[in-house]
Amino acid sequence: MDGNEVTEAFEMLLAELEAVRQRLNEEAASASKASEYDAARRAIEEAERVEKFSGKVRALRDEWASLSAKRSRPTKVRRTSTSRLPRGRRTHERAFRRPILEALIELGGRAPIGEVLDLVGEKMRGQLRHDDLEPLPSDSRSVRWRNTAQWCRDALVREGLMRSDSPRGIWEISDAGRKAVETEQWPA
């Protein structure tokens, strides 16, 4: 694991702890509403312990960030396997939907794939994970996030949010795609 993967692991752990804390808060609220005050108190105490533990994890994450920042040249770990990445290691395809459509709108409704993907990369700079920036095991010239965005484009075409009849190499938003961005209503 390199520095970014360790940081991602901390973030995933913190997200899971937050989900546990929220579930405990819901249990406390439900128990309180049902006048089960002992159960509510136990859930609150457990939520407080989880929050305290989360603070320790955040401190460790910050300490790790400080340590990894001091390293002069991080060692890059290359995947040699062609198997799929474990869940949560790359940005999900659905996260690319809005950035792709927004990029197309900003580019006048249609543009060459490369221009669209360059703008999508700028828009998603803070969201992309370490593994998103790595080359695909099957094609060392293709960066994973760009490949994921192209799969997302296929889904957008199937949903009618992008045009299917655009010339090869050109991506084009449809009227339905513009409407989805404006209204924040996405097909199921």
Image (cartoon, rainbow, N blue to C red):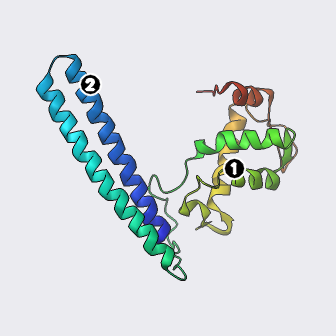
Q: Can I make out residue 161 in this image? A: yes
Residue type at numbered disc 1: Lys
Instruction: Answer above or below: position of 163 versus 62.
Output: above
> Mark 2: which secondary structure?
helix
Quarter of the rendering occupied by the C terminus: top right
Q: Residue furthest left?
A: 38
In this figure, which residue is indicated by the disc labeled 2?
Answer: 29
Q: Which mark is residue 143?
A: none
**Numbered disc in front, either 1 or 2:** 2
Which residue is drawn at the image coordinates 63% and 27% (left, top)?
187
Which residue is drawn at the image coordinates 48% and 57% (left, top)?
89
Q: Position of residue 105 (x, y in %)?
A: 81, 38
Q: CA distance from mark 1 to mark 2?
A: 38 Å
Q: Can I make out residue 1 in this image? A: no
Residue type at numbered disc 2: Ala
Q: Which mark is residue 123?
A: 1
Q: Position of residue 124 (x, y in %)?
A: 65, 51
Q: How many marks?
A: 2
Which residue is drawn at the image coordinates 64% and 45% (left, top)?
96
